[in-house]
Amino acid sequence: MSASEVLSRPSPLPLYDSAAPRSWALEEARALWKYRGLVHELVVRDIKVRYKRSVLGIAWTMLAPLLNMVALTLVFSTILKQQIANYPVFFMTGAIFWAFFSQTTSTAASQTQDSNEIAKRIYIPRSVFVASAIGVGLVNLALSIVPLLIILMVTHFPIYTTWFFLPVAVAIETLFAAGVGLWLFTFASRFSDVREMYVVIVQTWFFLTPIVYHPAIVPPKFRFALWLNPVYYLVQTFRKPVYDGVLPSVALVAVSSALSLVVFVSGWIYFAKRAERFAFHS
Amino acid sequence: MTAPAILLDKVSVRYRIPRERIGSLKEYAIRRLKRRLYFDEFEALKEVSLEVPGGETVGVIGRNGAGKSTLLRLIARVMPPTAGRVLVRGRTAPLLELGLGFHGELTGRENVMLQGALLGFSRREMRRRTPRIVEWAELEEFIDAPVRTYSTGMAARLAFSVATDVEPDILLVDEALAVGDERFQMKCHARIEDFHRAGKTVFLVSHALAAVRENCRRAIWIHEGRLVRDGDSASVTELYHGWSVGDPVALPQAL
């Protein structure tokens, strides 16, 4: 039996040929699609396990941003006397946005060890781990709409018709978070300190992004720091339809979509190229 | 002929191990800049050639660290060879080591769904298969209890039941059968026989030579990354046993 014999023999069974030339990015995408059931299972597992033994269960997801909001509203409206109309709503939209971004990317950065245990012994496309981090993030995001609605009602804030744009904003953010997650996952599979490093980065990034403060309070000479921050465009895209009641401008949507696309596509290609080597670093 | 087949053509696997353990990005960057990055190469497999037509049951024996698990990883396409070529015709399913992918907080049923998903099956397909899986594992009463309440043997039964129910063309078993009681071992043996009769391929990595003799017709012996013996399981396990207990039989050269 030689290689050519195996190859030439017609068979309905799938063939794996380690020497076959391949397109990494495409193959990973195909594999991810095939394993979409696994993504679903991982998301369900994560959510079930998290709440299985807790008293308040799923309510935690909604309670945490509310408590944060109360604390920060107190700090910003009474101590710093920042003039932002209806600060609770302003903060909540930003906080929901940020929670999704930081949760999903941090999970992607810290999942390599866990995933190696499994992926070392069985073939699975490792992008399922990034995809499941995104899935869990989206579920939490949907849940945190509830406390936002509560705040809107309590403060008699209108629900603008521009809310319909929110899914688009979420889609753009998802693309960006997935891209960052792919980069982080790939780095973290080689270097164990990426996870710790990212914890620090995310904290700093949070304060560099106008989540708790209004971008208008940034002095003109530091504005460039906002413009260089890709998340700035994303949070604006997300916040405008809910807080300002206007659609984000075409330019803003274009910039955030383009940024997200670049980060995602480059992340995907880099990830897929390195994917086969992951097993060597475990 | 549509039987599954495995072909390894002069396959080597080399791991690069940094001479000083560099796990951090910072260190890596500094060393890289200073051009002081040294690696030791460790060859887990050295030019192994192997041919397994469909329907064979192959036992893989050798000392710890000989390269047995690496061989299985190559066939399971978990890692690519550094040199040489691997051809695998057919769907492989590894029998995952005990508890791998099992989550203690989830119930047996939920874990079956998860295991099935790890093997690439859809939810609908797994829901269809679950009753049969549970029946074979004899866990009807406990299937909705969290797996953390299971004994080791119960978890092993469930894992084996899932891995073999999904009808892979090539089953890879890595040291998993030893934990069950006698009844379970006999059932496993019977199932591997069924596989054999159905023209499927089974790889069994084990230190239990009796299990290899019982379950496999053929055995291969891997020593320090080389394939040193390949033949019927009775004679290969006997040779290996003799060598293990220090028989003055010189270790045979690589095939």
Image (cartoon, coloured by chain):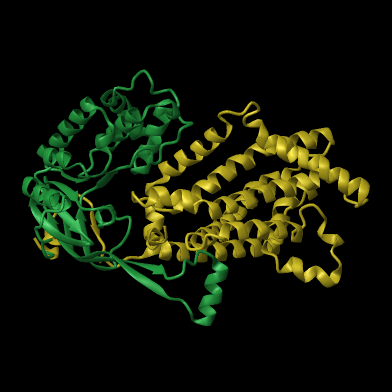
In the rendered view, tell whether residue A259 sits above or below residue A79: below
Viewer-nearest residue: A38 or B103:
B103
Q: Which corner quadrant of the image does residue A56 belong to?
A: top right
User: Seen in the image, is A238 located left or right of residue A215?
Assistant: left
Task: State which quarter of the image contains the C terminus of chain B.
Answer: bottom left
Q: Residue at x 77, y 42 (%)?
A: A68
Tally of marks: 0
Q: Which corner quadrant of the image does residue B138 belong to?
A: top left
Viewer-nearest residue: A81 or A261:
A81
Residue A23 in picture, x, y percent from top left = 36, 65
Viewer-nearest residue: B50 or B77:
B50
Residue A201 in picture, x, y percent from top left = 66, 60
Q: Which chain is yellow?
A: A
Q: Which corner quadrant of the image does residue A274 belong to?
A: bottom left
| Viewer can see residue B229 | yes
User: Seen in the image, is B111 located left or right of residue B72?
Assistant: right
Q: Which chain is green?
A: B
**The residue positioned farthest toward the bottom in the image shown:** B34
**The residue positioned farthest toward the top in the image shown:** B141
Q: Residue at x 75, y 52 (%)?
A: A240
Q: Residue at x 43, y 25 (%)?
A: B149
User: Seen in the image, is A269 located left or right of residue A79?
Assistant: left
In the rendered view, tell whether residue B170 sits above or below residue A109: above
| Viewer can see residue B122 | no
Q: Residue at x 8, y 44 (%)?
A: B217
Residue A276 in picture, x, y percent from top left = 37, 61
Residue B226 in picture, x, y percent from top left = 19, 62
